[in-house]
Image: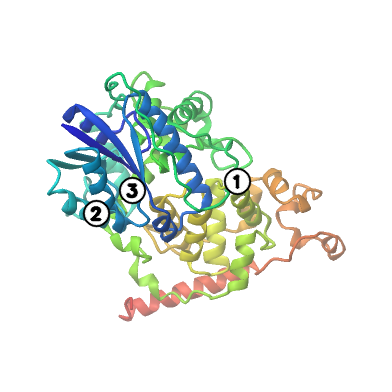
C-alpha cells in the first residue's frame, strides 16, 4: 500500500498520530500540504501567521525528506478546492490511502466531509485521526451527557480521565523509508506580503519548538505561577505559536513536565501545575467548538448576549488598534502586537476587557483584529479568550468582571518597563505617573506627546454595567435572544 499523509495544523514528524498510523498501514508514504490563501484570508489569517506556517512547512519538508518521505505542496485556494486537488494528487502519486488528523472548526469539518465523500471511491482507506488534543474534544461529558459549559468541572473531569487512562507517551518519528531522500516541493508565494515579525522571534521547526520546551521546563516552569502575569518578564513559555500550528503537541508538553518530575505529574510543582492548567484551557476551548459550533459562526456562546447594544464607534476602535487610546498599558499591548505579532497573555485580557467594557465595542471586532495580527492566531483560543473577556462566553461569573486598566498596570508592570519599551514618549515619567498620565498636573501633561484617554473608566464601567443589567431584566421578562 502507498499512503498520502495530509498535513494541516500538525506540522511535525514526532508524535503525529496520522503519520504514525499511515506508517503502520503502508509500505510507502507521500506527504501533502495545501496552500489556501483565499481561505486563510476568509479566516482572518495575517502575514505574521502565514509566514510562520510556511516557514514551518519548509522545515517539515526537510524533516520528512530525512525519512525518505517527499512533501508535495499544492495550491487549493479555498477549502472547496481540497477534494479535487487531493484526488489529483492521489492519482498522480498512485496512492490508495489517505490519513490526516482531525480539525474541529465548522468549515474544516465540512471540508473534511467533502474530502471523505470524494475520495471514498478512489481510496481503500480514508482515515481521520485524533491528534490535536490530549483527549478527543467530545470524550468528556457531564453526568447528563451534555458538553461542559464551564471550565472548572471540565478540568476536574479531564484530570480524572487522564488519571484513569494514564499519561500518554509521545510517539517517535516513523522509521526511514528506503534509501532515497524525499525531496520537498518549493513553496508558492501565498500573496500576503512581508511580515512585520522578525524571523528570529520564533524560529521554525520542531527541533526549535522542542528546544524551547526543554528550556522552559528546565529554567522557568518552577516560577511560572508567580511570574506568568508580568509582561516585562520572561515568565511564560512562548510556545503558543508552535502549539497553534502543531509543530509541538500537548502530549509532548505533558511528557516534558513528567520527565522532569520522575516520570509523573503527581507532586509536580505549583508552577508546573499552573502551566498544565493552561493546556487544559486549550483543550476546553476545543471541547466548546465541538459542543457549541455556533461560536465558529460569529455567534456568542451565551445567545442572550446577542442583544447587547454594542457601540459603533469606528474612531475609537481605530485608536485601540493603533495603540493610541491614552491608556498606557492598553497602548503598550497593542503596539507590542503590531511590532512583534505577539502579545503577552495578561495584556490580551487587559486590552480585550478595555475594548469590550470601557469602549463597549463588539468583541468580534477585537477577535478579528487579533487573528489578523497574531503569529499564534488560533481560532479556539482566540474566540474563547475574547468571549471570556466580553462576558459572552463560558463563565460562571459574567459581566461583573471589569478590569481597571490603571490598576492592572500598577500590579503587573509596576516599574512601567513594558510601557517604556512600547511607549517611549512616556519613558521619562516616574514609576507611579507612567500608569495614568492623565492624572498629572496640566502643565506636565501638556508637555507629553501622548493622547488624552478616550473615555473615563469609572463612567464607562457604570454604562457597561447598566447595559448588562438591562439585558438581564429583559431576559427575565421573557425577551430572549433575537
Q: Secondary structure at mark 1?
A: helix
Which residue shows up at 44% across the image and 42% down it?
A: 187
How many other residues sit within 10 Å of disc 3, few (<14), some (14-19) or many (≥20)?
Answer: many
State the image coordinates of residue 306 (x, y, percent, origin top left): 39, 72
C-alpha separation, residue under disc 2 versus residue under disc 1 = 36 Å
Sequence-wise, which precedes: disc 2 or disc 3?
2
Which residue shows up at 18% across the image and 39% down it?
A: 97
Res. 147 mark: 2
Left or right: 425, with 411 as reference point: right
Q: Secondary structure at mark 2?
A: loop
Compared with 240, 169 (above or below) is: above
C-alpha separation, residue under disc 2 versus residue under disc 3 = 10 Å
In the image as oriented, which residue stretches furthest toward the right? 443
Q: Nearer the viewer, residue 38 or 450?
A: 38
Compared with 87, 18 (above or below) is: above
Sequence-wise, which precedes: disc 1 or disc 3?
3
Compared with 461, 90 (above or below) is: above
Res. 340 mark: 1
Q: Is residue 148 visible?
A: no
Q: How is the image coloured?
A: rainbow
State the image coordinates of residue 343 (x, y, percent, origin top left): 56, 47
When asked about the image quadrant of residue 165, the answer is top left
Q: Is residue 463 visible?
A: yes
Find disc 3 in the rendering and name its residue.
284
Sequence-wise, which precedes: disc 2 or disc 1?
2
Amino acid at each position: 500500500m502507498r499512503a498520502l499523509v495530509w498535513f494541516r495544523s500538525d506540522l511535525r514528524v514526532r508524535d503525529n498520530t496520522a503519520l504514525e498510523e499511515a506508517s503502520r498501514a503502508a509500505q510507502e508514504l507521500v506527504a501533502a500540504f495545501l496552500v489556501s490563501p483565499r481561505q486563510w484570508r476568509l479566516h482572518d489569517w495575517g502575514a505574521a501567521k502565514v509566514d510562520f506556517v510556511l516557514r514551518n512547512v519548509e522545515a517539515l519538508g526537510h524533516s520528512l525528506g530525512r525519512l525518505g518521505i517527499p512533501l508535495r505542496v499544492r495550491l487549493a485556494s479555498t477549502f472547496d478546492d481540497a477534494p479535487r486537488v487531493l484526488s489529483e494528487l492521489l492519482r498522480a502519486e498512485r496512492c490508495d490511502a489517505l490519513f490526516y488528523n482531525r480539525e474541529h472548526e465548522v468549515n474544516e469539518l465540512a471540508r473534511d466531509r467533502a474530502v471523505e465523500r470524494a475520495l471514498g471511491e478512489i481510496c481503500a482507506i480514508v482515515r481521520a485521526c485524533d491528534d490535536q488534543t490530549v483527549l478527543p474534544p467530545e470524550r468528556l461529558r457531564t453526568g447528563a451527557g451534555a458538553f461542559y459549559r464551564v471550565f472548572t468541572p471540565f478540568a476536574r473531569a479531564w484530570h480524572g480521565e487522564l488519571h484513569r487512562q494514564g499519561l500518554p507517551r509521545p510517539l517517535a518519528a516513523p522509521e526511514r523509508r528506503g534509501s532515497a531522500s524525499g525531496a520537498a516541493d518549493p513553496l508558492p508565494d501565498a500573496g500576503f506580503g512581508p511580515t512585520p515579525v522578525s524571523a528570529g522571534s520564533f524560529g521554525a521547526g520542531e527541533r526549535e519548538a522542542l528546544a524551547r520546551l526543554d528550556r522552559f521546563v528546565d529554567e522557568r516552569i518552577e516560577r511560572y505561577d508567580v511570574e506568568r502575569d508580568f509582561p516585562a518578564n520572561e515568565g511564560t513559555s512562548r510556545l503558543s505559536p508552535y502549539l497553534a500550528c502543531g509543530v509541538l503537541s500537548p502530549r509532548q508538553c505533558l511528557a516534558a513536565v513528567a520527565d522532569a518530575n520522575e516520570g509523573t505529574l503527581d507532586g509536580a510543582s505549583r508552577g508546573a501545575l499552573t502551566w498544565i492548567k493552561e493546556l487544559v484551557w486549550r483543550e476546553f476551548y476545543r471541547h466548546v467548538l465541538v459542543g457549541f459550533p455556533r461560536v465558529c459562526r460569529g455567534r456568542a456562546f451565551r445567545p442572550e448576549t446577542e442583544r447587547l447594544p454594542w457601540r459603533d464607534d469606528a474612531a475609537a476602535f481605530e485608536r485601540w488598534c493603533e495603540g493610541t487610546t491614552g491608556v498606557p498599558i492598553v497602548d503598550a499591548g497593542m503596539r507590542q502586537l503590531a511590532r512583534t505579532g505577539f502579545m503577552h497573555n495578561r495584556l490580551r485580557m487587559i486590552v480585550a476587557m478595555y475594548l469590550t467594557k470601557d469602549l463597549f465595542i463588539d468583541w468580534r471586532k477585537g477577535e478579528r483584529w487579533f487573528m489578523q495580527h497574531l503569529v499564534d492566531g488560533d481560532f479556539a483560543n482566540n474566540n474563547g479568550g475574547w468571549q471570556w473577556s466580553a462576558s459572552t462566553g463560558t463563565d460562571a461569573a459574567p459581566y461583573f468582571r471589569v478590569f481597571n486598566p490603571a490598576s492592572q498596570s500598577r500590579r503587573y508592570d509596576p516599574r512601567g518597563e513594558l510601557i517604556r519599551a512600547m511607549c517611549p514618549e512616556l519613558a521619562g515619567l516616574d514609576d507611579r505617573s507612567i500608569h495614568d498620565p492623565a492624572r498629572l498636573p496640566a502643565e506636565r501633561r501638556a508637555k507629553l506627546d501622548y493622547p488624552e484617554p478616550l473615555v473615563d473608566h469609572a463612567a464607562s464601567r457604570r454604562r457597561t454595567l447598566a447595559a448588562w443589567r438591562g439585558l438581564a431584566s429583559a431576559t427575565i421578562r421573557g425577551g430572549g435572544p433575537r
